[in-house]
Amino acid sequence: MAVARLSRARRGASGAWLRDVFTLPHTAIQDMLQRNHVSRLYAFGDSLLFLVLHRPEPGEQGHVHYLELDQFIAPDFLITTHGPHSEQVPVEKMLAETAVAAERLLAGKLDVAGPAQLAHTIVSRLCQAEERFVNSIAHDVGLLEQKVMGQSQIRGGDGFLDELFRARHALLTVHTMAAQSTEIFGRATRLYEGADWLLPTLRDLQDQYERVGRISDSQLQFLAGVTEYHRARTDQKMAVAGEKLAVIAAVTLPISAVSGVMGMQTIQINDVNWPWTIAMLAVMTVMSLWLLWWTKRQGWW
């Protein structure tokens, strides 16, 4: 069994090596050399399978990096490569799953019967990393839920909406990865129904990704409920504020109109017409009291 790991520094020069030594198809090698934004699958008979998978890696300001893992799986060899990535992501992050598998394999701590089982070990670690990622986001969602359900004062400038969006974005990212990988392995199980050396591995990995997809989807629904409740509370506050403003307008507008028209006639620079002034103030008081009573009956306050 041959096992190879190719880093980004060797990818350009490795294309010819893969073609000449392992006689790998040109189309798969080309996809290996460039970044793939979605999961991919190439099936070459019953003796070779090419997979493109991804793992999420949290970045700055809520960004989630796509760490690409490409695999060539055959009965007698397994080749893993790691797609082009952002310079913000250390190479050690890219090699996390394959490095652990290689160390355990070389130390004799990993018992695998062939390349398919080794590929299963590596991809299973990808799934576990996605589950841990969802678990960390679920912790953040729980804190957001406590803020909303605790009736705490949430202001527009405290970054609460940004936290909601970042959590949703992270969950959508891992859910998308899991859904795409599920489709990939579902198709692979149909294509390799007669390949006993590979079929059990494909079925188990499909089941693992389906589980990750269901977990991330349920967490998305929970976050949607938290967001909906926060939105409902915000809408209610806006409605109450609008009613209060309507009461203020209803009470002050007629008074302002009366005082604007009659004030110039009753109060002048050198003279005050007290009878008319007192009458005007009495009318304004009666109007204010009546408007307050009317708005109270309307349930505005």
Image (spheres, rainbow, N blue to C red):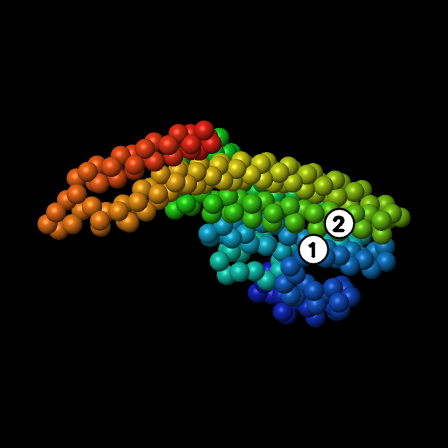
Residue at 67 percent across and 46 percent down: it is: 178
Viewed as shown, does residue 298 lie left or right of 36?
A: left
Rendered location of residue 282, percent (x, y): 26, 34
The residue carrying mark 2 is 183
Q: Is residue 136 visible?
A: no
Q: Where is residue 132 in the image (x, y as percent from the top left)?
A: 58, 39
Name the foreground residue: 113 vs 207: 207
Q: Is 198 left or right of 29, judged from the image as shown?
A: right
- Placement of 301 over or under 134, stated as above or below: above
Q: Name the residue under label 1.
A: 39
Q: Which residue is drawn at 81% across and 57% down?
A: 43
Q: In which quarter of the image is the C terminus?
A: top left
**Residue 42 is drawn in which quadrant?**
bottom right
Tell me which amino acid carries mark 2: Glu
| Circles 2 and 1 in contact, beta carbons < 8 Å | yes
Residue 200 left/right relative to 108: right
Q: Residue at x 86, y 45 (%)?
A: 196
